Image (cartoon, grey):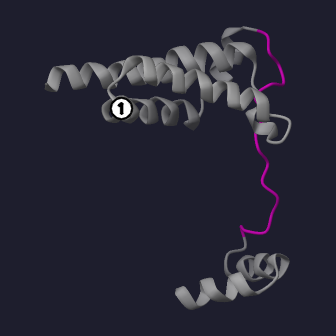
Amino acid sequence: YVFVLVILIIVPPMDARMLLAKIDPSLGKPIVLGLYAEDCSFTYDNVMGKMDRFVLAHFCGWFVKGLLVRHRLVLWCISISWELVELSTYYYIPNFAECWWDQWLLDVLICNGLGLELGLLLCSYLE
């Protein structure tokens, strides 16, 4: 395993991609990332269309952060700061471009907020 990793580090990136594509044919194809800022109308279908694995990842991540950090103000500041980072970097990472309601309502209030508040609630219950 380590030998293969050393070989992949030494060879040029395109050759490494071709080598990996020979091992697994599903590799070597361009990844199509879903864009979240295509249709920003605030409808039920659009909201449900944005529900993907990242919703669960946001919730679980902030639940664990609530268990670890245990300080409400710090957690909310980090959550809002990260959304501001996403706003400032979506020119470089197009996947970070989101509709306003997706970023502030779904991400900050529902996923992050619910996760961190439930994490803090579990902490206070276990004390």
User: For the point 35% across and 23% down, which residue is it?
Assistant: 71
Q: Quadrant of residue 30?
A: bottom right
Number of residue marks: 1
User: For the point 59% across and 21% down, which residue is it?
Assistant: 80
Q: Quadrant of residue 15?
A: bottom right
Q: Start and end of the magenta stretch?
A: 26-41
**Quarter placement of the C terminus:** top left
Q: Is residue 74 left or right of residue 87?
A: left
User: For the point 75% across and 19% down, which residue is it?
Assistant: 99
Q: Does residue 59 lie above or below 117 as drawn?
A: below
Q: Nearer the viewer, residue 38 or 88?
A: 88
Q: Is residue 112 left or right of residue 24?
A: left
Residue type at numbered disc 1:
Val
Q: Position of residue 120 (x, y in %)?
A: 30, 22
Question: Is residue 102 found inside the magenta-colored segment of the image?
Answer: no
Q: Position of residue 56 (x, y in %)?
A: 49, 33
Q: Position of residue 64 (x, y in %)?
A: 37, 35
CA neighbours of label 1 inside 10 A, class few (<14), some (14 to 19), many (20+): some
Q: Quadrant of residue 44?
A: top right
Q: Is residue 109 left or right of residue 62?
A: right
Q: Is residue 19 left or right of residue 81?
A: right
Q: Residue furthest left?
A: 127
Q: Nearer the viewer, residue 13 or 74?
A: 74
Q: Which residue is mark 1?
A: 69
Q: Position of residue 25 (x, y in %)?
A: 72, 73
User: For the point 82% across and 19% down, which residue is it?
Assistant: 39
Question: Is residue 37 found inside the magenta-colored segment of the image?
Answer: yes
Secondary structure mostly seen in the magenta stretch:
loop
Secondary structure category for the residue under label 1: helix
